[in-house]
Every structure is written in structure tokens, then in C-alpha cells.
Image: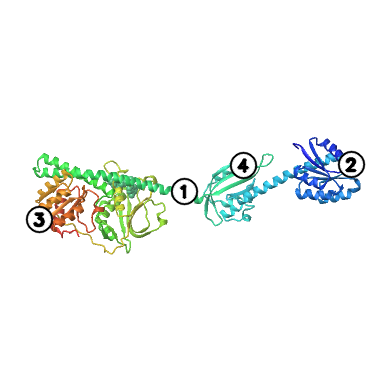
Amino acid sequence: MNGETRILVLEDSLTDAEICEYEIKKEIPNCVFLRVETEEEYRKALEEFKPDLILSDYWLPRFTGMEALKIALLRDKELPFIVVTGSMNEETAVACIKAGAWDYVIKEHMKRLGKAVKAALEQKEMRRKRKGAEEERARLAAAVEQAGEIIFITDREGTIIYANPALEEVTGYSREEVLGKNPRIFKSGRHGEVFYQNLWDTITAGRTWRGRVVNRKKDGTLYTEEATISPIRGETGEITHFVAVKRDVTEFLTLQEEKERLQVQFIQAQKMESIGRLAGGIAHDFNNMLGVIIGHAEVAMAEMEEKSSIYQHLQEIRKAAERSAELTRQLLAFARRQPIEPKVLNINEVVKEMVSMLRRITPENIDLTFEAGENLWPVKADPTHINRLLVNLVTNARDAIRETGHIRLATANRKVDEAFCQGRPFCRIGEYVEITVSDDGIGMEEEMLSCIFEPFFTTKPAGEGTGMGLPIVYGIVKQHDGFIDVKSKPGFGTVFSVYLPRYKGKEMPEGMEKKVAASTAGEGEIILLVEDEVELLEIGRILCERLGYRVLAASSPREALELAERYRGKINLLITDMIMPGMNGVELAKRIQKICPDVRCILSSGYGAASVLPRESMEFLEKPYTIETLAAKIKAVLRGREGKKHG
Ligand SMILES: Nc1ncnc2c1ncn2[C@@H]1O[C@H](COP(=O)(O)OP(=O)(O)OP(=O)(O)O)[C@@H](O)[C@H]1O
Ligand SMILES: [Mg+2]
């Protein structure tokens, strides 16, 4: 015992009190004493002196030891109280013990007092410690019982001897069902023997094991927990038990995965978008320059003898420029800036018409079949684009088949819901017509799938593939507000599924339109040609004049309006660029039509037509154009068919 011990002595005899003091100091030298006689003093001393122990005479002038005991117990049940009394009163002393006194000492045997006080104080200390320990244990037990984490304890053999309520909540097993069992009952089959062996080796070696475990609930569903399993050691240091603390992280992991999936999807979409912008921008400028090259080459060729070597060179220039124009057209298709002329279609008809052509581009050893879906919904799409899409996908399928194989085309109506969209980056909920092109060719690795829609990604040798096939498919599908899904497995084959939105309007599907054959001769009709790029304007003028038309050339919309106002005769046709500073082609066409009501119009552009072209659809001429396409277009608009007027 450290520090001084405070002893309150309730005793009317000073001598007796001194004897007590003397006897106690023999055992406990470091003591302070306070002697009181009356109840009043006694009560005051309890408050202020705060004794560690009380010694009380039994008989006092106006007070008894029993009364003093009751007062002391009321105040503190754990305060040692020793009765000191004459041998005559031993019976009353015994009564005091029954009432809660700790001990009694007969005055005739005062020598025992020191030891009695010491024993009482030691017992008090022991009781205090035990009580503290009990409280702590109760606190710990409550914490473990109420913890949100699963906590269970096993013996050295792994038998569960304790489990908290959280275990019942997460796993569905009641406490009774798991007690006495091995944690094996939670096994999901997702981890091999090595996994469990490693866990067991770690904890039996006295170390803590941490990790994620997939376990099975009572109802059979799987959940993932984050677990910490530690050995518990006994007093001698040997392992007596193991404690497992676990948290169900299934929901957290699902959210995490979803977040990562969205992130990947977002980055992928952004990448495609920026590649698209870049490609579209470059292609537009290229187109204009190629228009100038092709035009001048054609004009020069027209002035030469076909046999001349310069004619041959010019022809090569023209061919190269046309091939380049084809490439820029592909880039524009990817960038979704290719003009589209959507019609309400039955995709089955489009595919059926294409099948024989597709068979021609696939060798004999490849079987090509088409399974047309029944009662297919209509879609609104540009048939030439759908043809293109089919050719590109079938070509790829063909190239993926090494010897013999099967390419399967199929169509079907598809309702796409949220569950379907899970894990499919570009998917959106809705009703679609699905076109599937599957092959049993070489297939692709997972990593490759994320690059195949990027322009110029190819695994084919130089000269065999440009890597523009799928980007074009991607562009076309995007432009039609659809999406593509690819599934592939190396060695097994690939399935491309194109989803085009169901058309819900009233228009009926059209049959395929046959193109009007072109003839080139103009008869001096007046064409108002508007183009802000001067070189293009110039070559356009030359080409139109070669075709037998007369040309009013304007390098801006304002100039065009002035020309139209001033010109006395009849203007038959307006050919205008789509995108010009100050006013776009559509706007200009409307204003020119006010001045010359009968004029027909052709809008010409390298891109952007789809979004700007009004629904009533003015005629459209894609840039760059050759003299033939120009001739055919003009002829078609002026004579071949009813010129569509802008309403
Ligand atoms: N059905 C398929 N099976 C296996 N791999 C394919 C399939 N379709 C595409 N690929 C892979 O994707 C790459 C890109 O295809 P994409 O059509 O864009 O370009 P390409 O076929 O290489 O060249 P291009 O189509 O311009 O001639 C191909 O090189 C090929 O590796
Ligand atoms: Mg290809």
C-alpha cells in the first residue's frame, strides 16, 4: 500500500485510542489517525477526513458501534469497518459482522489489531481491483456484442466457441448454429486449398492474417469480407484461441466496380470523341484541297490527247487524289460528319439485298448465312451506310477465318434494359433492331477490344488493312444513335452486335431507290455558284462551264445575293457551300429562293450536312466531287426528277 492510510477511530477513551494507534503503527507505520466521540463528529469526519478504514468502539456515551456501521455502509459499502470491543460484548460484535462489519477485535487481545487492520486494507484493495476487472470485462463484452463487425473466437482447433450478433446478421446463421462448428461452414469454393493453408499457417505461427475472403451465407449467396484473424495467447505465451474480426464489403466493392466501369466508359467515350474531332477537322481541309487537285487534273486532261504522257501523269494524279478523298471520306464517316440521307427501312430487306454481294467477297470455304428476325421493327437509317457497315464487318469476319468457317448474319428486335447495359460501355436503354455479324475465326484478346474502334488500328500487314473498317462502323452507328457490342474469345470467334434504335414514327419503310443515270451535257442553264474558298470556287466554275452551263460565281453569301438581285435573266440552279462566314448555305438558299422563286438548290459540303440539312431535304453534293458526280447531280436536280423545293 502506498501513501498514508487514513484511519478514523470512534472511541471515547483516549487511552484505548492510543493503544489502537500504537498497535496499528507496528504493522502500518505510515498512518494518520483521527479520533471522534460523537455522531456529529463522526459524520463530519466521514465527509472531510475521508477515512480508508474505521475502527469503532461498540459502546459510546450517546451512540453505538452498530449505528456507526449503518451510517458508514450507507455512505460506502466498500469501506472497511472494524469493531473494537470488550470481551463481554462479543455477541454484539458478531451481530455487527452479520450487519456488514469486516472484523472485530477484543480489547483484551489488542495485539491482533494491527494484523486485522492490515488484512482488511489488503482485502479492500483486492476487492477494488476485482471490481475494476469485472467492469472492464463487462465493457469489453458489450463492445464485442454490439460491434458492427463480425467477431468470433475459436479454440486452437478452430472450433467456434463465441460469435457475436453481427455474424448472425450477415451470414444468416444463428449463434447456436455456429457454436461448436468449424468456420469451414462459410466456405464458398472460391478459394483453393493453398489459400486456407496459408491462412492457417500464418495464425498458427503466431502472426495475424489479413485479407479478403469470399464466403457463403446460409441462404447460399456469396459475400466478400475483409478479415483480420489473430492468435490469442494465454499467460504463459502459448496460443489458446483465435479471434476473427470481419467486415462485409460486398456492397462497397460493387459500388467501387461500378465507379471504375463508369470511369473507363467515360474515358473511352472522351477519347473517341476527341479523335473524332481531330479526324473530322483534318479531313475537311483535306477534302477542299483534294477538290482543287482533282478538278484541275480533270480540266487539264480534257485539254490533252489521251495518248500523251502528260495525260497519263495527270490521270495518276487524279487517281491518287481520289484514293485520298476516299480515305478522308472514311475519316468523316468515323467523325460522324458524313452526310446521311436516312429513310425508314426494314433492315431485313437491306441485308437480304446485300447477301449475294457479301458472298462474292467471301471465299468458297466460308459459309455465309442470314437469319432474318421476324416482324422486325423499322429503323430510320441511311441504307448506303448500312451497306457499308455490313461490308466492313463481313470483311473483318472473313479475314479472321483462317481456313474454313462460318459467318452468320442475323437480325432481331431487342429491348435493352438496365441489366443489359451493365458492363457495356456505350449501351443505352431502349428498343433496338439488332444486327449480328458473328464468325468462328481467330477471335481477339480482351485488351484488343478497347482499341479496335480507333482509326488506323490494325493487326493486318501494311497494304492489307488501313484500320478504318471498324471506326467507320462506329461512326455510322453513332450517327444513327445506336451502339455496338463486341464479344470475342481467342480461338473461338467474334460476335459484333449493332443496335439501331427502333423507328416509332408513322412513315412506312421505303423500297430501295435506284440511282438516276448521269448524262453530262448542260444546255446553257445558269448556275449561281457560291463558295468561300476561292480555289474551289474557281475549279467549280471551270467544271460547270465544261459541262455546258453558264456560271455566276460568288465567293460569299452577300455577293451571291447581290448577283441574284442584279441578274436580269432566270437563274436555274444554286450550288452553294454549306458552311460559310456570315450565313450558311440553307439560309442563303431560302433568301435566293425569295428573289428567284423557281431556282433549284444543291448544298455542297465536306461535312456537317446531316445536322444542318433541313428535314425537307435539299439536294446534297458531297465534296470533293469529280466531274461525273457533279454532272449527275446537276442533271438530276434540273431534269432527272422533280427538283425539291424548299418549303
Ligand atoms: N471479326 C474479327 N475477328 C478478329 N479480329 C477482328 C475482327 N474484326 C476486327 N478485328 C481486328 O480489329 C482490327 C481493326 O479492324 P478494322 O476493320 O478497323 O481494320 P482492318 O480490318 O485492319 O483494316 P480495314 O478494315 O481498314 O481494311 C483488325 O485488324 C483485326 O485485328
Ligand atoms: Mg476491316
Q: Residues within 10 Å of mark 1 (few under 14, many from 20)?
A: few
Q: What residue type is labelled 4?
A: Thr
Q: What residue type is labelled 2?
A: His
Query: For the residues carrying marks 4 and 2, which lies nearer the camera in this image?
Result: 2
Earlier-in-chain disc, 3 versus 4: 4
For the view shown, which residue lies furthest in the right direction? 88
Mark carried by residue 256:
1
Q: Which amino acid does label 1 sit on?
A: Gln
**Where in the figure is residue 286, as x and y percent of width and height?**
22, 43
The residue nearer to you, when weighing 581 against 216, is 581
Callout 3 secondary element = loop
**Where in the figure is residue 446, as x and y percent of width and height?**
39, 46
Query: For the residues carrying marks 3 and 4, which lies nearer the camera in this image?
Result: 3
Q: Which amino acid does label 3 sit on?
A: Lys
Callout 4 secondary element = helix
| Residue for badge 2 | 109
Earlier-in-chain disc, 4 versus 1: 4
Drawn side of residue 45 relative to residue 395, left or right: right
| Residue for badge 4 | 204
On screen, residue 309 above or below 512 = above
Indicate the quadrant containing the N terminus: top left, top right, bottom left or bottom right.
top right
**Where in the figure is residue 82, as x and y percent of width and height?**
82, 45
Query: For the residues carrying marks 1 and 2, which lies nearer the camera in this image?
Result: 2
Drawn side of residue 437 relative to residue 558, left or right: right
Q: Estimate the spatial distance between the alpha carbons at disc 4 and disc 1, rounded to whole Å.
A: 34 Å
Looking at the image, can residue 490 be seen?
no
Earlier-in-chain disc, 4 versus 2: 2
Indicate the quadrant containing the C terminus: top left, top right, bottom left or bottom right.
bottom left
Mark carried by residue 570:
3
